Image (cartoon, helix red, strand yellow):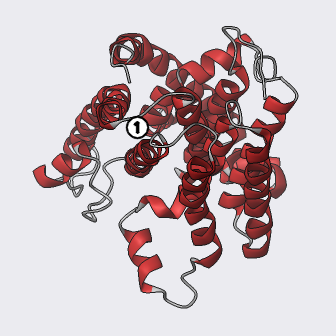
Amino acid sequence: MSINKNENRYAFADGLRGLAALWVVFYHLFHGDHVNQLSQFLGKTISTIVFEYGNLGVPIFFVLSGFVMAVTTNNKHIGMPQFKNFFLRRLVRISPPYYFSIAITLILLAVKIHYVDHAGVFPSPSNIAAHFLYLQGFLNYKQINVVYWTLCYEIQFYLFFGFIMFLASKFEDNSRQQFSILISSTLIGLIWLFWSSDENHNLIYLYSQEHLLFINYWYAFSAGALVGWLISKKNSFEIYAVLFCLSILVISAYKQDIFALTSAITSISLYFALKKNKMGTWLSFKWLQTLGLISYSLYLIHNSVTGISARLVRKFFDIGILTDLIVLTFTIVSCLLLSYLMYLIIEKPVIKLSQKIKY
């Protein structure tokens, strides 16, 4: 499967990432009770789609993460040194912005406890240390910022994905043995999606949910990876990739799992973009590409910014739809501006640094 080789090669993926990040911002605006009047005015259907379902930006992130990891490792031999560098490169790419956002969150939390909520509790040193090691979920600590749980999954995804690439690289490209490794390793996620349920109080499932183990959403990451692998794999592999994504669609409908449904729709959309050679043109609007560029920073800091922005606006305006609109506008603009600054100051240098680590 071929695609245009230009600088906007993955514009569709970047555009999706930007929309997903913005959707998550809308979600936290709603669940932070910052746009109640506006939500009621819009009506249940529109409000649900625009605000309440904004958390579905997360499965979009997971699928895109798998896609990007597959694309960046296509046609590469991953031995142990490459595996180590692959994981180190991912750590260097995501950790500094994450650590910076933790520092900002802790500072704002300290200010809130001192001036607003005297009953608030500052995270313990062990909790903070666990966050820095991406172990807060596994160690069952409360999230310092509600968005951080996804980073626990991302780190585990990278580790398992790197291990799969290490095993697959022991065999010739497009060989039966290599396909067997890729298929069996991704099939684990699909089986888990179908089998896992808390209805029967399954202890393994409950444990994995409580401790944020990667297997819960491995199917979403795998769906993206399978589409990404199609760029370099034989057409015979395409059959499995398509069946995998369609299986998620069927299982999600059967289980009424909207998270899985979003994963399926995202992966199928990526597939069609590749198939139709539209990865460089769909969602290639400049503003949307810029949004995709700052999406990681936006995701990390928006939840801290929304609360401050909303409280600041409400100091000067009475409750009402107009006030909610002002809150929405002021919050989005604030989040975008701060995210762009964070991208320039923190992310951009980090990206250049991570690219120096070859694998």
Query: Where in the figure is residue 321, as x and y percent of width and height?
Result: 71, 40
When the figure is inspected, residue 243 is found, relative to residue 200, above or below; the finding is above
Q: Which quarter of the rendered picture does the N terminus lie within?
A: top right
Relative side of 333 to 302, left or right: right
Identify the residue at horizontal 59%, vertical 56% (top origin): 180
Query: Where in the figure is residue 203, as x and y percent of width and height?
Result: 42, 85
Q: Quadrant of residue 101?
A: top left
Q: Is residue 261 visible?
A: yes
Query: Where in the figure is residue 343, as x and y percent of width and height?
Result: 44, 16
Q: Residue furthest right?
A: 276
Query: Where in the figure is residue 195, as x and y percent of width and height?
Result: 61, 78
When the figure is inspected, residue 92 is found, relative to residue 347, above or below; the finding is below
Identify the residue at horizontal 37%, vertical 26% (top origin): 93
Relative side of 112 to 24, left or right: left
Q: Amino acid at mark 1?
A: Ser
Q: Is residue 40 visible?
A: no
When the figure is inspected, residue 302 is found, relative to residue 186, above or below; the finding is above
Q: Which residue in the structure is indicated by mark 1?
A: 304
Circle 1 residues within 10 Å: few <14, some 14–19, many ≥20: some
